């Protein structure tokens, strides 16, 4: 008997992506580890973040689905290919996310500043569930003669 969870796993590119996500979660960079300690358990603005989230063809370092925010922590290799990062950002934004990037050395050397910037950004984002405006009465008005 095949369990339903095994049926969902499938094979091919989806399976490869899940394997890569698992590898990235198990081997974070020092900067990712530091930032995760501050992002986990809703410690920033009571917003839930996940690590290594698949969005389209990419894997984001950190993502909040409710705030529609992706946080990328970039190492030195990202300074060489800014066009690829711009394209990656554009694709992730096409899925409705806002992307913010920090350099590894900023996270390691100025973690508090990075956290404040994230908090400020989250505070400036529109509410994900704005309250509905009251629609009023649906009855047509009676015309007076």
Image: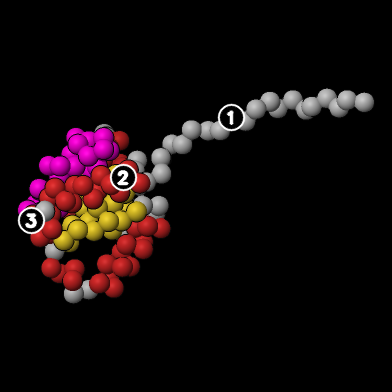
Quarter placement of the N terminus: top left
Secondary structure category for the residue under label 1: loop
Q: Residue furthest right?
A: 145
Residue picked out by circle 1: 134
Q: Earlier in the sequence, mark 3 or mark 2?
A: 3
Residue range in magenta is 24-50
Instruction: Say whether disc 1 or disc 3 marks the residue closer to the N-terminus.
Output: 3
User: According to the image, label 3 marks what residue?
Assistant: 109
**Mark closer to the chain start, 2 or 1:** 2
Does the magenta segment cover residue 49? yes
Q: Residue at x 22, y 56 (%)?
A: 72
**x and y percentages locating residue 138 in the rendered image:** 70, 27
Label annotation for residue 122: 2
Quarter-of-image position of residue 13? bottom left
- Circle 3 — which element? helix
- Sort mark 3 into few (<14), some (14-19) or many (20+) by Cα contacts within 10 Å: few
Left-right relation of 140 to 112: right
Residue 143 in the image: x percent, y percent?
86, 27
Residue 116 against residue 142 in the figure, above or below: below
Point out the image quarter for the C terminus: top right
Q: In the displayed structure, does residue 73 sit left or right of residue 5?
A: left
Query: Toward which corner of the image does residue 3 lie, by quadrant?
Result: top left
| Crowd rating for badge 2 (residues with CA inside 10 Å; few <14, some 14–19, many 20+) | some
Question: Do the residues under discs 2 and 1 have CB atoms within 8 angstroms?
Answer: no
């Amino acid at each position: 008997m095949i369990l339903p969870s095994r049926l969902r796993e499938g094979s091919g590119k989806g399976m490869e992506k899940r394997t890569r996500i698992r590898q990235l979660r198990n081997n974070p960079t020092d900067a990712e580890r530091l930032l995760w300690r501050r992002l986990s358990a809703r410690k920033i603005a009571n917003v839930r973040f996940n690590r290594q989230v698949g969005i389209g063809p990419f894997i984001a370092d950190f993502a909040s689905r409710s705030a529609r925010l992706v946080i990328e922590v970039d190492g030195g290799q990202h300074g060489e290919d800014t066009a690829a990062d711009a394209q990656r950002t554009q694709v992730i934004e096409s899925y409705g996310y806002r992307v913010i990037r920090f350099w590894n050395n900023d996270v390691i050397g100025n973690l508090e500043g990075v956290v404040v910037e994230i908090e400020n950004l989250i505070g400036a984002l529109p509410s994900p569930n704005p309250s509905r405006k009251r629609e009023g009465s649906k009855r047509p008005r009676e015309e007076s003669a």
